[in-house]
Image: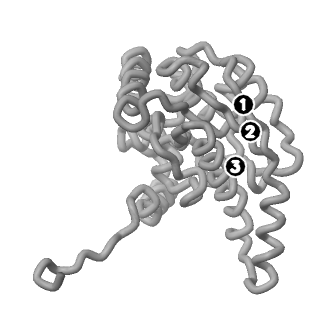
Amino acid sequence: MFNCENVTKDCVEWIREFFEENGKGCNAVVGISGGKDSSVAAALCVEALGKDRVIGVLMPCGEQADINCAYDLVNHLGIKHFVINIKDSVEGLKNSLSKTVELSSQTLTNIPPRIRMTTLYAVAQSNNGRVVNTCNLSEDWVGYSTRYGDSAGDFGPISKLTVDEVKKIGKYLGLPQHLVEKTPIDGLCGKTDEDNLGFTYAVLDKYIRTGVIDDRDIKEKIDIKHKNNLFKLKFMPIFEPKEKDI
């Protein structure tokens, strides 16, 4: 039932409206990994704003095996881009922290995406920009993102679209096939998304949109991840004193 053409056009218009209200004349700044999500998000922004108002930021951490895909995307769209290697920042922070704090493996995994988001905001602030969140609905559903890392941003054009729907939009926009169909990897530990999750995006997408799933164990795994990670999608809880006391 997914109407790719209508959703794409509506999303493009939504991006234009966002910039009219939250940064008229500003640029869209998007971290480019070479995967489908950043590729489609960038392409949607080009459709909405024109290529002169979209800035790509490539952020390898040392050597990045698939960085050619990121170059393919910025060259295909014809957008301005920066290449900022974050390795020195990551290693510097790890070294400083390790002198006083025993770092868990999860902490070490999440440092790079948080530094990448800091980098994106630095580029945006220096280039009259707004940062694009490139998470999709499937990832957000099970919390497959880093809080204040790739889960951050100023606006999310694909946040309510599943992996399958993002791919369809990428094809509709004429993105290169190898970018749209690229096997998603987390870029952190070298594993594919599906290896880390323990189920496929096809199964997850069907469950999200229809509620249908055949494997009860996978259903339970998805439900637990969804419940435990809902906090990532909400603004931090804040205490409100009673009116009579202030």
Which of the two discs, 2 and 3, sits closer to the camera?
2
Crowd around label 1: few <14 · some 14–19 · many ≥20 (10 Å): some
Which of the two discs, 3 and 1, sits closer to the camera?
1
The tag earlier along the polypeptide, 3 or 1, is 1
Q: Identify the residue under disc 2.
A: 58
CB under 8 Å between callouts 2 and 1?
A: yes
Q: Does 74 sit above or below residue 207? A: above
The tag earlier along the polypeptide, 2 or 1, is 2
Q: Does 120 sit above or below residue 224? A: above
Q: Identify the residue under disc 3.
A: 186
Amino acid carrying label 2: it is: Leu
Residue 100: x and y in percent read 76, 86
Residue at (71% x, 33% y) in the render: 34
Residue at (64% x, 31% y) in the render: 55
The tag earlier along the polypeptide, 2 or 3, is 2
Query: Does residue 224 appear left or right of residue 200 in this picture?
Result: left
- Judged from the image, the secondary structure of the residue bearing numbered disc 2 is strand
Residue 63: x and y in percent read 88, 46
Which numbered tag is attached to residue 89? none
Query: Does residue 180 appear left or right of residue 238 in this picture?
Result: right
- For the residue pair 42 and 188, the one nearer the viewer reads as 42
Which numbered tag is attached to residue 81? 1
Residue at the extreme right: 63
